[in-house]
Image (cartoon, rainbow, N blue to C red):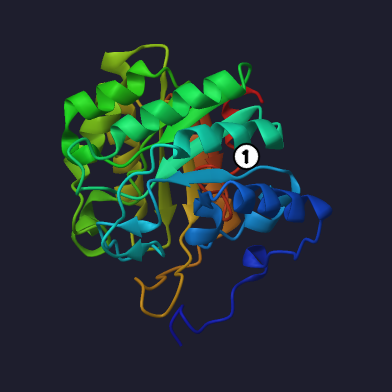
């Protein structure tokens, strides 16, 4: 029996949460016509996060120009960027009372700046609407274009995150339209642009990687200047996606956390249900 049909172990069974705050969050998102990666990417934590009145905003539409084997985002022709979207994100962040705001996007290889201008405008609108909030931008690689990354950095986010997702060995299978070295280059450039901005990245395990490959990845991220790291279990959105190769045990996540901390990461979140923006504010003490 393969992992796609095998019953999930006890540590991967999520308790169903019903809370009035979930309806509150859904109503704000609907009224402001906003998308979240929570829903579009089928995050297993979305009910918990909505109950806590938090959400990760997904800008630049729902349609991604790439088609990664692990991802549930729709691969289709994208619509033009909505110039009013940054204002609406700011309003939603204020309406939810967020102290830590995470903004991400689909990959927009069709745009000359990869959507960096929309990220920058969104950060500025959040600053206007929520002056005391910290802001994280979870960005695509912008095809390695330096001016695009500089535009995001110039808008003044507290954290710029770019998920490397998996080990170098698996890139051709899991992220065929991405490039491991290019992603490391994005992370390395963050510190060069502004030392006040923390560089963050996230990975999934359970895709068939070896322990040695994971530790090599940790070393590559540290060398690139990454200071915040998230590690979570990969869960295939459907049978059509890249298959789960292993349900990694909680004690292995604990071991990875200890090793990464020992390598100099300022903050490491490592457990089966960790996702890049799950309890993201804790990295800054929020």
- In the rendered structure, the answer to whether residue 50 lies left or right of residue 146 reads right
- In the rendered structure, the answer to whether residue 106 lies left or right of residue 24 reads left
Instruction: Please state which of residues 95 and 221 is positioned toward the viewer in this rendering.
Output: 95
- In the rendered structure, the answer to whether residue 15 lies left or right of residue 99 reads right
Instruction: Look at the picture and state if 17 lies above or below 283.
Output: below
Residue 252 horizontal/vertical position (percent): 52, 52
Quarter occupied by residue 71: bottom left
Instruction: Please state which of residues 236 and 104 is positioned toward the viewer in this rendering.
Output: 104
Residue at 52% across, 39% down: 257
Residue 224 horizontal/vertical position (percent): 28, 27
Outermost residue toward the bottom in this view: 1
**Any part of residue 116 in sight:** yes
Residue 85 horizontal/vertical position (percent): 46, 39
Instruction: Look at the picture and state if 92 lies above or below 225.
Output: below
Instruction: Look at the picture and state if 266 lies above or below 109.
Output: above
Mark 1 residue crowding within 10 angstroms, few (<14) / some (14–19) / many (20+): some
Quadrant of the drawing holding the C terminus: top right
Which residue is the site of mark 1?
A: 279
Quarter occupied by residue 94: top right
Q: Secondary structure under badge 1?
A: loop
Residue 139 horizontal/vertical position (percent): 36, 38
Residue at 41% across, 80% down: 239
Quarter occupied by residue 67: bottom left
């Amino acid at each position: 029996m393969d992992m796609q049909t095998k019953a999930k172990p006890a540590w991967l069974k999520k308790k169903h949460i019903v809370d009035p705050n979930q309806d509150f969050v859904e109503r704000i998102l609907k009224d402001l016509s906003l998308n979240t990666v929570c829903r579009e990417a089928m995050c297993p934590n979305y009910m918990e996060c909505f109950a806590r009145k938090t959400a990760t905003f997904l800008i630049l539409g729902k349609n991604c120009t790439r088609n990664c084997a692990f991802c549930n985002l729709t691969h289709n022709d994208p619509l033009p960027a909505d110039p009013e979207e940054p204002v609406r994100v700011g309003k939603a962040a204020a309406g939810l009372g967020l102290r830590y705001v995470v903004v991400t996007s689909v990959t927009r290889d069709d745009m000359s700046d990869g959507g960096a201008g929309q990220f920058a405008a969104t950060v500025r609108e959040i600053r206007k609407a929520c002056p005391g909030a910290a802001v994280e931008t979870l960005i695509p690689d912008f095809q390695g274009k330096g001016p695009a990354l500089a535009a995001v950095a110039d808008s003044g986010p507290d954290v710029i995150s770019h998920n490397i997702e998996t080990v170098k060995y698996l890139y051709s299978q899991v992220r065929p339209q991405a490039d491991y070295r290019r992603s490391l280059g994005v992370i390395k450039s963050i510190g060069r642009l502004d030392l006040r901005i923390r560089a963050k990245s996230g990975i999934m395990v359970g895709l068939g990687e070896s322990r040695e490959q994971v530790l090599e990845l940790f070393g590559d991220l540290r060398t690139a200047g990454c200071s915040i790291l998230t590690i979570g279990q990969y869960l295939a959105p459907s049978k059509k996606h890249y298959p789960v190769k292993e349900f990694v045990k909680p004690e292995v996540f604990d071991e990875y956390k200890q090793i990464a901390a020992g390598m100099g990461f300022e903050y490491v979140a490592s457990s089966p249900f960790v996702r890049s923006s799950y309890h993201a504010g804790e990295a800054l003490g929020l």
